[in-house]
Each structure stands twice: as structure tokens, then as C-alpha cells.
Amino acid sequence: MEIKKVGVVGCGVMGSGITQLCAQSGYQVVVSEINDELLNRGLASIEKILARSVEKGRISQQDKDATLGRIKGTTNTKDFSDCDLIIEVAIENMDLKKKIFAELDEICPKHAILATNSSVLSIIDMAVSTKRPDKVLGMHFFNPAPIMKLLEIVRTIATSDETIEVCKEFGKSVGKTAVIAQDKPGFIVNRLWIPYMLHAVSLLEDGVASRDDIDAAVTAGLNYPMGPLTLVDLTGLDVLLFVADAMYEQLKDPRYIAPTLLKKMVTAGWLGRKAGKGFYEYK
Ligand SMILES: NC(=O)c1ccc[n+]([C@@H]2O[C@H](COP(=O)([O-])OP(=O)(O)OC[C@H]3O[C@@H](n4cnc5c(N)ncnc54)[C@H](O)[C@@H]3O)[C@@H](O)[C@H]2O)c1
């Protein structure tokens, strides 16, 4: 099966990035939002990023115009009726995702593949709200989607080999390194990364070392590009807590228990870079 037209449900942080990535890779893209205001905000963020790329000489004005020309924004789900692949990128809420999948199943062509960008939810639960569970899978992009190289392709017990193959090829066509993971909480990256980040917060909480020394030790000693506490600030402390809690709830593995310090900082509204304060302060 050849993918020509891609649908993206949700034009927030990830949805706008995935829309940009697919359009820049030559696909026609339909992207939806719940209202015009959010749609315009998402489309404007894509325009702004492309304009900056033109200024920096990374792409030409012509490339920018052609990319934007391939994107159609909508608030009407019926506009997905001729898409070959639809990627759901709405908020991380199972009831909402099930509703979106059931609706897409009614609207989209029979051959269409339905994917979710969910980070922690069970994908088979979404698949069974459709009549095509063999064509449902996870396509987990990383933020920012146009830049980060990895795509985790997540297979449920019902996903067909053909669906996986088509999506692997699609991943390559948008320049990603596609890896396959099973439909188990956290897939590959969050399974490894969440305990690491939580552990860094615990080191600080336990007084093992200062914030600056934890970050300096990891950058200089492990050659990581960024220290873990800087990275938590960038990701958002609330996002880390949400994912850790969701993984602990499903796995009951103590490695995913969030330290008290993380919970208190989230309560205080110290969510990291986006809030102006996290482990560090931002102007
Ligand atoms: N932010 C990240 O770093 C990241 C990374 C990987 C995966 N994810 C996953 O991607 C998904 C989206 O995350 P995000 O950070 O982009 O969230 P976000 O809040 O920035 O965007 C979600 C958007 O979906 C829209 N939406 C909700 N219901 C909709 C509907 N029925 N139709 C169309 N649009 C709808 C919302 O209005 C919102 O703008 C989540 O499942 C999240 O877990 C996020």
C-alpha cells in the first residue's frame, strides 16, 4: 500500500511538528483541531518555524511555500475521508483517544492505517474501538518531531505484518530511524529514560550532590549532551510526573515511583523552562 495523504488529529506541540515533518517530506497533510483558534495557532507555529529556517538559509522560500501548500487545516473530521494514514496526536487521555479512533474508523477509507502518538497508553485499547485492529498501531515521534531522528513503531498483538512494513517504510520516507517495540508501557525509550530522570531527582533530594554537580557529572562523565536536571526542565516536570505515574500504575515497578521532590515542585508550579522556574530559573 502506498501512502499519499496523511491525516493528523491535533495541532498542538507534537501534532504541528508531525504535520510539518510530513509536509516537508512531500506528503499532502490534513490536520485537525477542536476549534479555529487552536488550529490557527498550530498552523502559525509551523509557519514561524519554516520562516526561521528560510532566514537561517536552511531551506528556500520556495521550499517553505511548497510545504505550507501541502498542509490543509480543518475542524471537520470528515476531511480525513481520503487519507491513507491518520496519526492521532490529541491529548493523553484514553477515553478521548478511543472516541477519536471509533470516529476515524467510520470516516476513513477501509485501507487506511490508524496510528497513535501516545507515549504511555495501551494501544490495543484504542484498536478495539475500531473494526480494523490489524491496521492500528503506535507511531511514537519525539519532540521536536521534525528534528528528532527516532520513530518508535508500536505493535499490538493484533497489528498485521503488512501494517508494520508500510509504517516502517513511511518512517524511512520522513527521514526517521524506525524501531519496533511491543505495546507495553513506555515502549523502549521511556522504559529506560524515565527511571534515569527520576533517579537524578532522587540524587538531589537525598543530598548526594548539588544540582550543578549532578548535571556536570553526567555531561562530562557520560558525554551526554545535557545534564538530567536541565533535561527535566526542558521536558516539563509535570510531563515527567505524568508519564512516571502512568507507567507505575501499569507496571507496579518501583523504578517508576516519582520522588517526593518532583511532586512538590509540580504542586508549586515549578514546571521547568516553560514556567520560568524548575531546577533552574529562566528569564
Ligand atoms: N510533548 C511531547 O514531548 C510528546 C512526545 C511524544 C508523544 N507525545 C504524545 O503526543 C500526544 C499529544 O501531545 P502534545 O504534547 O502535542 O499535546 P498538546 O496538548 O500540545 O496538543 C494536543 C492537541 O490536541 C487537540 N485535540 C484534542 N482533542 C482533539 C480532537 N478530538 N480533534 C482534534 N484535536 C484535538 C488539543 O486541542 C491540543 O491542541 C499525547 O498523546 C502525548 O502523550 C507527546
Image (tube, rainbow, N blue to C red):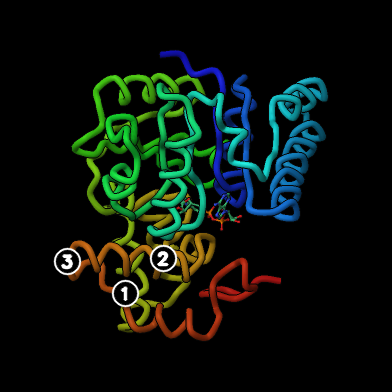
Which residue matches tag 2? 240
Identify the residue at image location x=24%, y=22%.
161
Type of residue at label 3? Asp
- Comes first in the chain, label 1 or label 3: 3
Is label 1 in a helix, a strand or a loop?
loop
Question: Hey, which residue is sitting farthest front in the picture?
Answer: 106
Q: Estimate how packed mark 1 is, as few (under 14), some (14 to 19) or many (20 or more) residues with alpha carbons within 10 Å.
A: many
**Circle 1/circle 2 CB separation < 8 Å:** yes
Question: Hey, which residue is sitting farthest top in the picture?
Answer: 2
- Please state if 257 lies on the left or on the right of 112 as rendered: left
- Comes first in the chain, label 1 or label 2: 2
Which residue matches tag 1? 258
Q: Position of residue 119 (x, y in %)?
A: 38, 51
Identify the residue at image location x=35%, y=82%.
205
Vertical comparison of 43 with 244: above or below: above
Is label 2 in a helix, a strand or a loop?
helix
Calculate the distance from the C-alpha at mark 1 to the C-alpha at mark 2: 9 Å
Q: Position of residue 154 (x, y in %)?
A: 30, 38
Q: Position of residue 30 (x, y in %)?
A: 63, 33
Identify the residue at image location x=35%, y=52%.
222
- Please state if 127 lies on the left or on the right of 47 as rendered: left
Which residue matches tag 3? 253
Vertical comparison of 224 with 181: above or below: below
Type of residue at label 1? Ala
Type of residue at label 2? Leu
Q: Estimate how packed mark 3 is, as few (under 14), some (14 to 19) or many (20 or more) residues with alpha carbons within 10 Å.
A: few
* Front one among 275 and 218: 275
